[in-house]
Image (cartoon, rainbow, N blue to C red):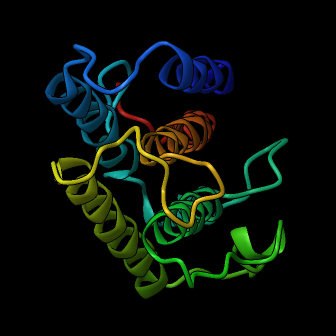
């Protein structure tokens, strides 16, 4: 659904929203910030992962090929790639799909868990800083971005994070580890 929205937004900005239009960019930035950090329709990422019992972080869940940590690390890796692609013309994306998922392992240390969370939120803060940088026109094409805009990449992060966040919440419920 977000892909349809992105295509419509892209077509709108290319065909119907020329420079000088009355689009309220402050409102757009505020709304995007809300989706990135606050989880307006559901819950925030922080709320979704806080309080997960240690034994459930890397526990296999029935009918799921991944664990909660693997989903969270996947979100982090994808978010990092999209952010670095947006900011750095020399960035090389990882190989698909292996580079976007952690290697399977039987054990997860507290340090690995903490590192995933720390790096995820550090990149998320960097995305928010990009979003708040009013010198960047979000609808402009990224100079090295193959026709993509800053707005498209931010929406892609929002969409991807929300999808996998839903999977994490579902897993927590199956593990009976999700507060009401």
Q: Is residue 129 above or below residue 81?
A: above
Residue at left offset 34%, top offset 30% = 43
Position in image of residue 176 (x %, y %) = 53, 37
In the image, taking residue 172 as reference, residue 146 lies left or right, namely: right
Which of the pair 134/34 is nearer the observer?
134
* Quadrant holding the N terminus: top right
Q: Residue at x 30, y 48 (%)?
A: 46
Horizontal and vertical percent for residue 4?
A: 67, 19
Image quarter where the C terminus lies is top left
Check the image and report above or below for 159 versus 106. above
Task: Say which residue appears at 43% left-offset and 58% top-offset.
Answer: 53
Q: Is residue 148 visible?
A: yes
In the rendered picture of this protein, how many numbered marks are placed on residues? 0
Q: Position of residue 157 (x, y in %)?
A: 50, 47
Q: Is residue 142 left or right of residue 47?
A: right
Which image quadrant for residue 100?
A: bottom right
Residue at 28%, 65% (x, y): give it.
Answer: 126
Q: Is residue 101 visible?
A: no
The quarter holding residue 114 reads bottom left
**Residue 101 horizontal side relative to residue 176, left or right:** right
Above or below, 28 against 102 in this view is above
Q: Is residue 129 left or right of residue 67?
A: left
**Residue 163 horizontal/vertical position (percent):** 60, 36
Q: Nearer the viewer, residue 1 or 148?
A: 148
């Amino acid at each position: 659904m977000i892909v349809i929205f992105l295509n419509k937004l892209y077509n709108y900005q290319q065909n119907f929203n020329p420079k000088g239009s009355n689009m309220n960019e402050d409102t757009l930035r505020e709304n995007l910030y809300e989706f990135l950090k606050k989880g307006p329709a559901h819950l925030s990422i922080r709320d979704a992962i806080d309080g997960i019992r240690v034994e459930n972080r890397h526990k296999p869940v029935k009918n799921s090929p991944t664990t909660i940590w693997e989903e969270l690390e996947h979100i982090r890796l994808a978010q990092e790639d999209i952010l670095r692609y947006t900011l750095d013309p020399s960035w090389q994306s990882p190989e698909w799909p292996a580079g976007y998922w952690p290697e399977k392992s039987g054990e997860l240390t507290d340090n690995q868990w903490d590192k995933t969370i720390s790096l995820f939120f550090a990149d998320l803060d960097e995305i928010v800083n990009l979003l708040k940088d009013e010198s960047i026109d979000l609808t402009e094409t990224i100079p090295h971005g193959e026709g993509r805009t800053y707005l498209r990449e931010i929406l892609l992060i929002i969409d991807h994070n929300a999808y996998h966040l839903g999977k994490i919440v579902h897993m927590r419920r199956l593990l009976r580890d999700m507060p009401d």
